[in-house]
Amino acid sequence: MKNWTNLSYANVATTSPAAHKASMEWSDALARGGAAEFGGEAEKNGMMPLRRAAARLLSSEVADVCVGSSATELLCSLAWAVSPPRGSNIVSTRTAFPSTVYPWSRVAEANGAEIRLADHDEALYTNPDSILDLIDDTTSVVTLSHVEYSNGQRYDLRRFADAAHSVGALLVVDATQSMGMVPINAVLSGADAIVSSGYKWLRGTYGAAVAYISPEIRDDLNPGLLGFRSHVDIWDLRADRMELPKDASRFEYTTIHFGAALGLAAAVEEINEIGIEEVWKHDLTLADSVVDGARLLGIEVASPLSDSERSAIVSLRLPEGVSSEEISRRLQDEYSILVTSRAGLLRVSPHIDNSQADVQSLLDALKHLLS
Ligand SMILES: Cc1ncc(COP(=O)(O)O)c(C=O)c1O
């Protein structure tokens, strides 16, 4: 079996061993005994470990956090719940990950609302002012990837929350590329909702995601996706009425891969134990080494590097004529090093499982491949 060096947490984590263990134990128990091993009470409480862990990571209340199967699913349910009205607009960026925008496009199409996307320059950099310029009195939602997936650009959430709120709009944050890497205080950020998938910086498996839904907006939100679990008492099964829970769990509507959620809870608790500030410092130190090493090799860094806009995602522009696709594939095939080719750039995204030795291996391999 190969020993991989995963320097691509912006793509898919090599699952935290604690998460993998919890998820496998749950799967094994289910395979052994079905509902005898995972019964009604366990199913009812199945989201709680992850809700507690994510709330701790976001410095929020457990009541403000819910669990879903993917970030995209939670964003879709939220978009229908908010349902921006005819004549209003939704502001985002052209570089955003499609799932940050598509759920809103779908609702905008149905309602007759407008999507406004801020442009970027040739380095994929989006001037934050150009996003702010799109916000006006008819804006209903500002939706941003906290950290852009292609080049790691990070936005100041407080600034956008204030801008959105000043016109009565909501700030919805896709934190899939930041939660678990960047410290986020949900309340201080001012965001109305924060959604994150679990299989990247949080180091879970596929199949679980979390959302923070601010208590300020929650009562008015009727989720776009409903099911038996949407009723406040999930085992009082009657199709002729439904009362949503008061807390964020109103967005939990059905069964999920509970093993993924239990595993993700274990992975998030690992981050909580290390401390997110420590994780952030560690990841940025490795990102610095990627930047310094790449420059010594004559490789241009396309990611923003100022303290206020950077992250642990470092995207490299390889020399003219060298394909990032091919280099990424050769790093994987010949050196067992995982990075990703995105938008013509070689994206490196180290995390807590990585060391300086991993970064050095990448730089040594790049030197050979480019010489
Ligand atoms: C910003 C962002 N949001 C969402 C996703 C997808 O999340 P999920 O697979 O949980 O829907 C990705 C995946 O790359 C992403 O980068």
Image (spheres, rainbow, N blue to C red):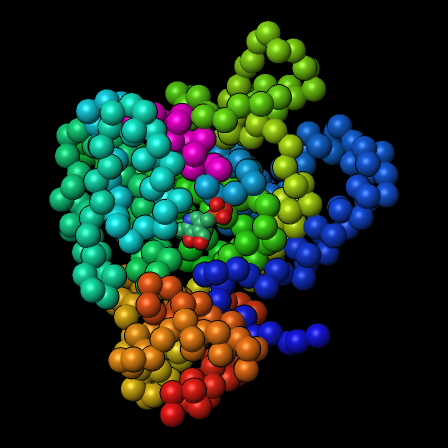
Residue at image location 25% in from the left, 25% down from the top: 112
- Which range is magenta? 73-84
Residue at image location 62% in from the left, 21% down from the top: 228
- Asked whether the viewer can see residue 203, the reply is yes
Q: Is residue 269 left or right of residue 359?
A: right
Q: Quadrant of the C terminus?
A: bottom left
Q: Quadrant of the N terminus?
A: bottom right
Residue 209, position as x, y percentages in the image? 53, 44
Secondary structure mostly seen in magenta is helix
104 magenta-colored: no
Toward the top, the furthest residue is 240
Residue at image location 39% in from the left, 78% down from the top: 290
In which quadrant of the rendered view does residue 36 lie? top right
In which quadrant of the rendered view does residue 52 lie? top right
Residue at image location 77% in from the left, 50% down from the top: 25
Residue 103, position as x, y percentages in the image? 38, 36
Q: Is residue 34 left or right of residue 199?
A: right
